[in-house]
């Protein structure tokens, strides 16, 4: 049994927040939902965990689903260990089990030294790690993390991703939303969203090999299917014909998501 | 042609040191990136450069003159919150900025904003708002342009388009300083300044920052617990494709820890890995 969404649409008044979105999640795997602000990432997360009702479509969700909102969910006036104890109490975990589980999570997140520090005194990276720890505390089958890495320094981002990986390897399905395209490579599958619509979806290797047309690198802007990347231009050839003066490049995930956005724009 | 310079900038907020001993220079035609996490001191630095915040110590020079003696019209600024008036329409925002700077109101033709000229900014999508903020900041043809996280939360295509505008502005002779927390945007800049906890940790072109930094690539079978052992030994472990990259430990140490069965190889660091190594 896999979790996810089948043809889900959500509307807020006249605004279409999600448009026929399908997402498949497997135990032990990380699905990355990528898109800009307003793409529908938060709505997707909220639908998955049951905080938002759907107009059309099906949500497949296990009973034990946990969610970390964009704001991290950490209480500023509680200490690190109190935040975890409060969540454990909410799930009714037996106190001896809760104690060992909390110690284990403090250990792997390297928050043991900060266990008595107030939530609002934590750095951004520590706060996000605590937020994820609170979400995995009750050992959910599905873990949904909304933009856990936004604004973090590179070291904290790396640490948080290794914690997320570890949580997935314990056998749960994980969803991570992000605006950083480079983070797609850290997951097993990707769902690229724009304006509530799916631009690209599938395993990270499949979406790269399934990119239509060919991709070239040029020194100057060439044609309408071009965008600036680094110190050169990328030119997408939809029909696969050669681009004069261009050197063919193997697309990476950033290119693939950009091409998908270009296709979406032309549609 | 105006050069933007800062010498020994320092800013305290009470006991918190937001920026410490920061010097920088942005020449005409140059795009310089200020990279760092939230709280690294990027916005505080920019606000001091703009004269919106008085430095505790240090000087800002614009075209060689002390900043406070320089006509504000040489500067263009897009703040993180975009700095538009939400209760005014798109056209009104533009008219207001143009009259404040004493320049003719720019045309909205070919900007994609003409059809929403009479819509209040609060009802305009974020992407179009950002486009308007760029037009407003450049309407007086500034020779120094300061952009605070202009691409934050923008999709990949929108980001590529914004970078095109930034490069065009620099190409026309402006000195451009851009902050971002997207590591991959470093390659869009001629030079970058990496900030961590208010200090510069490195600066130069992307290849200069990477310099001699090396990482250790690990592929193949790695027993559970070995990754934690690498971290315990002082390494930072990054997941990379079907393997791992280790920063902060030499190849022989990594090899000893992961044991046989895994392939261990020293490789040049990526930009992100260099940043991790430099901020450790």
Image: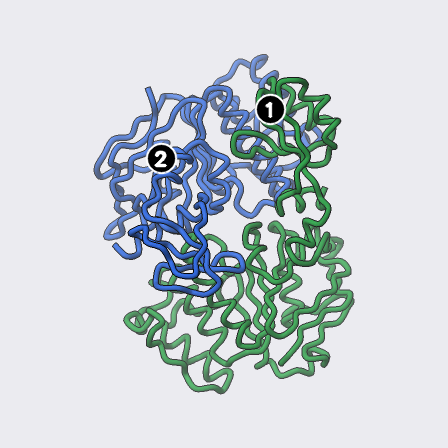
Chain colours: A blue, B green
Question: Mark 2 touching mark 1, by CB under 8 A?
Answer: no
Q: Chain of mark 2?
A: A
Along the viewing direction, whichever of B220 and A96 lies nearer the viewer? B220
Q: Disc 1 designates what residue?
A: A105
Check the picture and name the quadrant holding the N terminus of chain A: top left
Q: Residue at x 35, y 43 (%)?
A: A211
Mark 2: secondary structure? strand
Q: Residue at x 26, y 44 (%)?
A: A19
Q: Residue at x 51, y 83 (%)?
A: B101
Query: Residue B152, image x and y in percent?
Result: 50, 55
Along the viewing direction, whichever of A30 and A218 lies nearer the viewer? A218
Say above or below: A105 vs B92: above
Say above or below: B150 vs B106: above
Q: Disc 2 designates what residue?
A: A202
Q: Is residue A79 visible?
A: no
Q: Residue furthest left?
A: A56
Q: Which comes before the other along the chain, label 2 or label 1?
A: 1
Mark 1: secondary structure? helix
Q: Quadrant of residue A247?
A: bottom left
Q: Quadrant of residue A111?
A: top right
């Amino acid at each position: 049994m896999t979790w996810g969404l089948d043809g889900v649409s959500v509307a807020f008044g006249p605004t279409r927040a999600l448009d026929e979105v399908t997402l498949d999640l497997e135990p032990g795997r990380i699905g990355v939902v990528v898109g800009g602000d307003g793409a529908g990432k938060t709505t997707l997360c909220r639908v998955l965990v049951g905080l938002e009702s759907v107009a059309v479509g099906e949500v497949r969700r296990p009973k034990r689903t946990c969610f970390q909102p964009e704001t991290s969910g950490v209480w500023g006036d509680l200490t690190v260990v109190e935040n975890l104890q409060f969540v454990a109490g909410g799930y009714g975990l037996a106190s001896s089990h809760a104690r060992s589980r909390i110690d284990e999570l403090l250990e792997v997140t390297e928050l043991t030294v900060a266990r008595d520090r107030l939530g609002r005194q934590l750095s951004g990276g520590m706060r996000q790690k605590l937020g994820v720890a609170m979400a995995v505390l009750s050992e959910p089958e599905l873990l949904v993390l909304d933009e856990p890495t936004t604004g973090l320094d590179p070291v904290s981002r790396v640490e948080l991703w290794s914690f997320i990986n570890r949580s997935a390897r314990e056998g749960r399905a994980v969803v991570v939303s992000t605006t950083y395209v480079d983070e797609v490579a850290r997951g097993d599958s990707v769902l690229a969203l724009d304006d509530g619509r799916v631009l690209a979806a599938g395993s990270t290797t499949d979406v790269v090999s399934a990119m239509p047309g060919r991709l070239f690198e040029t020194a100057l802007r060439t044609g309408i299917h071009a965008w600036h990347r680094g110190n050169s231009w990328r030119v997408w050839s939809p029909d696969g014909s050669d681009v004069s003066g261009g050197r063919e490049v193997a697309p990476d995930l950033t290119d693939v998501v950009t091409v998908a956005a270009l296709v979406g724009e032309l549609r | 042609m105006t050069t933007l310079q800062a010498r020994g900038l320092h800013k305290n907020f009470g006991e918190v040191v937001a920026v410490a001993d920061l010097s920088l220079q942005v020449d005409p035609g140059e795009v310089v990136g200020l990279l760092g996490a939230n709280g690294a001191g990027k916005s505080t630095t920019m606000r001091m450069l703009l004269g919106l915040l008085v430095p505790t110590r240090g000087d800002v020079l614009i075209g060689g003159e002390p900043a406070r003696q320089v006509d504000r019209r040489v500067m263009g600024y897009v703040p993180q919150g975009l700095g538009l008036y939400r209760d005014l329409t798109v056209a009104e925002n533009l008219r207001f900025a143009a009259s404040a700077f004493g320049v003719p109101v720019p045309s909205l033709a070919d900007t994609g904003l003409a059809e929403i000229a009479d819509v209040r900014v609060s009802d305009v999508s974020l992407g179009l708002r950002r486009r308007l903020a760029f037009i407003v900041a450049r309407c007086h043809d500034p020779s120094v342009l300061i952009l605070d996280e202009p691409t934050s939360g923008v999709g990949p295509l929108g980001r590529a388009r914004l970078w095109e505008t930034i490069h065009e502005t620099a190409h026309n002779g402006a000195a451009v300083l851009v902050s971002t927390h997207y590591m991959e945007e470093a390659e869009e800049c001629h030079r970058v300044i990496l900030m961590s906890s208010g200090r510069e940790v490195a600066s130069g072109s992307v290849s200069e920052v990477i310099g001699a930094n090396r990482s250790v690539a690990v592929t193949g079978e790695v027993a559970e617990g070995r990754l934690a052992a690498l971290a315990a030994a002082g390494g930072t472990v990054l997941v990379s494709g079907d393997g791992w990259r280790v920063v902060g430990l030499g190849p022989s140490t990594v090899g000893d820890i992961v044991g046989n069965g895994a392939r261990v190889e020293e490789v040049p660091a990526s930009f992100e890995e260099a940043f991790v190594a430099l901020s450790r």
